[in-house]
Image: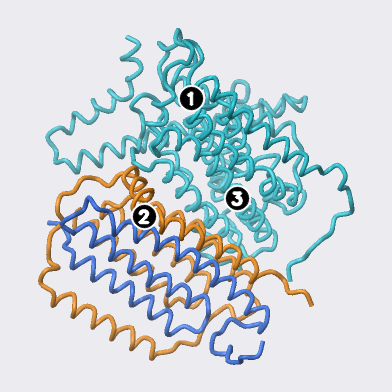
Chain colours: A blue, B cyan, C orange
Amino acid sequence: MSPTLQLFLIVSAALFCIGLLAALSRRHAIFILIGIEMMLAGANLNFIAFWRFSSEPHQPTGVMIAIFSIAIAAAEAAVGLALVISVYRHYRTTNVDQLDQLKG
Amino acid sequence: MSASLDQIFVSGKQWLLSWLASAPEWVIQIASSFINIFALLGVFLTLFALMSVLERKILGRIQNRYGPNRVGPFGLFQPIADGIKMLIKEDIVPARADKIVHFLAPVLIAATAILALGIIPYGRDMTPFTIDGGILFFFAVGSTTELAVFMAGWGSNNKFSMLGAMRAIAQMISYELPLIITVLPVVMVVGSLMPNTIVAAQGGYALGFVPRWFVFTPWGATAFILFFVSGLVESNRTPFDVPEGESEIVAGHMTEYSGFKYATFFMAEYIGMFAITGLATTLFLGGWHAPIRMLEFIPSYVWFFAKLSTLLLVYVWLRGTLPRTRVDQIMNFAWKFMLPMAFTCIVAAAVWHYAGRGPAGWLWSLAVIAAVYFTLSILLDTRRKFAPRTYRFAE
Amino acid sequence: MNSVAFIVIAIFTLAAGLAAATLQKLMHAALSFAVTFVGIAAFFFLLGAEFVGLVQVFVYIGAVAVLIVFTILLTRRDVEKDRMFNWSGVVIAIAVFGGLIWAILKTQSLSVAAPEIPALTVKRIGEVLMTNYVWPLQCVGLLLTAALVGALILVMEEKQ
């Protein structure tokens, strides 16, 4: 008795939706970043699961995409958090609802 | 005879598991893991107790005093007295502390320190946890320590704790780069991330008598020194103990901990030290291989622990000899000297490999390292730059 | 792969993820975020992609989580607690989840068991990275360098 592909997909869908929830309903910029990271992780889980259950597992395409996606997520987090800090320096807030001016 | 003595622990484990021969496979697997865990904990907690008293004795001798000598013969039972003292002390949690984070930090830091010990080969066929990416596992687990230190600093809600945690994280992140990059040449030359394979690649003798340990190649020697210094920083030891500099910030991130939680931090620090010296032994000093062919009858684990204790002795020696460095000195040293030298090691290892791994390659890689070293020493000439320090404060 | 491990890891990961998304204190949310990624790494181990699991722990716990807690520390003068909660986001998330579940359960070809496969060694990943994926690898290197420089420029103090 081992879990099927469906179960993995359900878990990764749940993870994606938790990330979506964090990104949509929280007003703090860091929460939004956390949400985006979780959505990316859900997608990674899907890639790995599809690789594991595919008929050609000797071709590690899913694994490669997951590795590249982790690298890109790290770059995104670094730039995103740098943006949060520089926005905070300007406006003294990290609440995204209050950042509604185009003037610097 | 010597072969059976060499394998005595492995066969002991087999004998224990033979009691379970009729059980289902997952029971045997779990039992096998538990035996490994208990062996690891037993050996390293004993070593920790021994190290804590020996360190104080040796430091005492270096500083021309006796050190602990009241409890038991030569003060050897001092750790037991210390343990009882730590256990019956009051466990103080500050009123404004973040209770959960404050509680979880020592748990996490001890757990990760012990996990990292798992991948090191302690002797022939004596790796507790064999995994394909063992070295990566070590660093993945080790990088969790930073978060634990931060939790300790934040959870305590104390400015000294926070400052200590910030200092610790800043220097750990800075030195993690040279630490990992100096491992790369070994991984490149061996072609594997598995500690067992790395140790196996260092067996045998060049020219009939020089062991093929990587520390005897120019790139290996440089990488070993850089790795050792980075290891000192990662385990927050003198001369890089600014995160817990008593004269400046009480005890850094451990200020608000008392009793058994403080002891856990202390233990985690020592176990982290054992892990990093164990990895240095595995990567550069030939793991459990004997240095001379004539001495190969001595069991492999004896050699491993002899090398480990030598490195630990150097740690204590440095602690007794060197003063504490300044924070900016540590950072400058990491980014301006350690990092370029670590990259040079990779190039030198590649030169060594392509020049045939013989004496010619040896000389060529020495030339590469010497050239970069002297260039750096000219570029970083600090003698001319004595000036009043400028301060920058956080906003 | 067994179901017990799967269920334990799934509950652990999703509970930590939900905590990361809903906890009021920012620092607790950031730490739960780290726990979530440990859970996802455990999933990768379960699926036989050990290398990716280790990279995940290394990058997310060792780097991204530390970056996040540092950012929280540097923007602390702002409200430490995030009380405002937008309920329309919850509705949208649940709707998307329902849609995804419907699609997954509707597709018959997905209910397959895992085939027996040889273990994916680090050596194999290295070979593939250096042959088929060498251009993506270079691009990621370039991207990371650009991100490093960009992040530094963004947080550098502006000269008045």
Label 1: few (<14), some or many (≥20) within 10 Å? Answer: some
- Residue occupying image coordinates x 68% and y 59%: B163
Q: Where is residue A80 in the image (x, y as percent from the top left)?
A: 54, 72
Instruction: Locate the C terminus of chain B and report the quarter of the image it occupies.
Output: bottom right
Picture disc at residue A22 = none
Q: How far apart are marks 2 and 3 (CA)?
A: 32 Å
Q: Nearer the viewer, mark 3 or mark 1?
A: 1
What residue is disc 3 on?
B172
Name the residue: 30% across, 64% down. A45
Q: Nearer the viewer, residue B337 or B107?
A: B337
Q: Please report contact status of discs 2 and 3: CB closer than 8 Å, yes or no.
A: no
Do dots 2 and 1 share one subunit? no
Reading the image, the residue beneath label 1 is B357
Up-down relation of residue B224 to residue B178 (above or below) = above
Image coordinates of residue B368 in percent, x first then y, are: 62, 33
Element under label 3? helix
**Image location (x, y in percent) of residue B203:** 42, 21
Which residue type does callout 3 highlight?
A: Met
Q: Which residue lies furthest to the top in this view?
A: B294
Q: Dot 2: what SS? A: loop
Look at 62% across and 51% down and name the residue there. B174
Relative placement, left or right, of C5 versus B294 is left
- Would you place residue B241 above or below residue B39 in this image? below
Instruction: From this view, report whether residue C19 is shown above or below residue B390.
Output: below
Separation (CA) of disc 2 from disc 1: 29 Å
Amino acid type of the residue tagged 2 in the rendering: Tyr
Tag 2 near tag 1, CB within 8 Å: no
Q: Which residue is drawn at 77% across and 44% down?
A: B380
- Residue denoted by label 2: C133
Q: Is mark 1 on a helix, strand or loop?
A: loop
